Amino acid sequence: MSLATASLSATAAARITLYGFVCAMLFAATSSAPTPLYPLYRALYHLSPVTITLIFASYAFALLVALLCFGRLSDFVGRRAMMLAALLCNALALTLFMLAQGADMLIVARMVQGLATGIALPTFGAAILDGDKARGPLLNAVAPFLGLMLGTLTGAILIAFVPLPTVAIYALLLTLMLFALALLPVMPETASPAPGALRALKPQIAIPPRALRPMLRMAPAIVATWSLGGFYLSLMPTLVILSTGLTSPFVGGSVVATLMLSATASVFIFRRWSPSRARSIGTLALMAGVGLTLFGINQHLVTLLYLGTAVAGQGFGSIFANVMKSIMPLAESHQRAGLFAALMVKSYLAFALPALAAGCLVSVLGLAATANYYCLGILLMAALSLLTGRSGVVLTAEEDKKMAG
């Protein structure tokens, strides 16, 4: 524990925990805000599915670079300095979105946004754990799902009911971002400055030795869940229009929001379960949900599409929360940002690479066929997760009880 963390009063700890949680949600909301706009961008600027996925992937790859280069930096220069950098970068990204008039500017805006989010994720995630180590993993699991849901749903509502939809959502988020900036000076510092900041800029994956085996153990489940998230946030809004014939952006946005709302609920539903049981049931829910969604897409059944999405969300949320609950407590205070960054690197590679490959395949196979192959890939990875669990790559009973308690 750092001196800064040890000297925190209960009030200061609660303040930084709440601030970190709200800001983490805000960054997640910002990252998902363009999702319901993709069909509109496609019509306005005559964008192909490949271009849409490139816009999406540019965010994820910029985020990965930021995680690798800046993910551990708040452990050395302090949390508040990196919070300031993340908030300013995101404000710039939102301004660029409002000014965008084509694919080039959208890609630039997404890259700046990815840089901001790559700085923000480990910094705010570590600050939440600094303030509340007991509930920190739960809050870190809930924040992205709540933020992603609010971003897509708010964006979809504004598109349907507010003039200038390509500006309105970003203007709202920019206002909230500036408010967060105004509150930053009154937040306590929870990480004492330490030597080694320049070395921390060298791209590397910083995983404490005791966390390495659990991360490898959970890799198939992480890939299955985050590739599902990438699919929904990049191609699903356009796929919904193609499959159902419903052209309202609200429909596509609400499908994505359903996934995230269900994922949020599952974090609380499964929180008292043992990690191995929650992971197994969550993986089965993910597989069942993806299967239902796939059937709904091919049979043009909107109700089944929503039902499958809700079931898959139960798997998404429970697996991610399980990963956070099992892995993050294995890091000391000076290792938290680095471990969180490493976990996010693995997650966002699964988030971006399959979606980018799918975008390239759309022009060859068509959107519906690509979606079928994509979902089958998720099912195979989820099945692999179950098989590795049955072959003994699981927590011991003693570890299970410790994690569940």
Image (tube, rainbow, N blue to C red):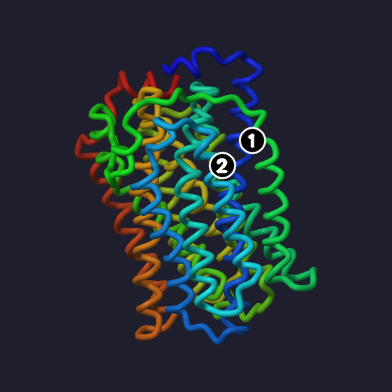
Residue drawn 39% across and 85% down?
363
Give the labeled residue for mark 1.
Answer: 184
Percent across and percent down for residue 386 are 30, 45
- For badge 2, the amino acid type reads Leu
> Which residue is nearer to you in this view: 284 or 231?
231
Q: CA distance from mark 1 to mark 2?
A: 8 Å
- Relative to residue 73, is residue 305 drawn left or right? right
Give yes or no for contact between labels 1 and 2 (Cβ–Cβ under 8 Å). yes
Q: Depth check: give the residue in front, 104 or 57.
A: 104
Q: Which disc number belongs to residue 197? A: none
Label 1's element? helix
The residue tagged 2 is 84
The residue positioned 63% from the left and 34% from the top of the image is 19
Residue 404 in percent (x, y) is at 43, 23
Q: Quadrant of the C terminus?
A: top left
Where residue 278 appears, as percent x and y from the top left, is: 42, 36
Q: Secondary structure at mark 2?
A: helix
Q: Is residue 273 above or below residue 54?
A: above
Q: Foreground: 33 or 239?
A: 33
Nearer-N-terminus badge (1/2): 2
Q: How many marks?
A: 2
Task: Using residue 117 as the reference point, say whether residue 154 is left or right of it.
Answer: right
Q: Nearer the viewer, residue 191 or 210?
A: 191
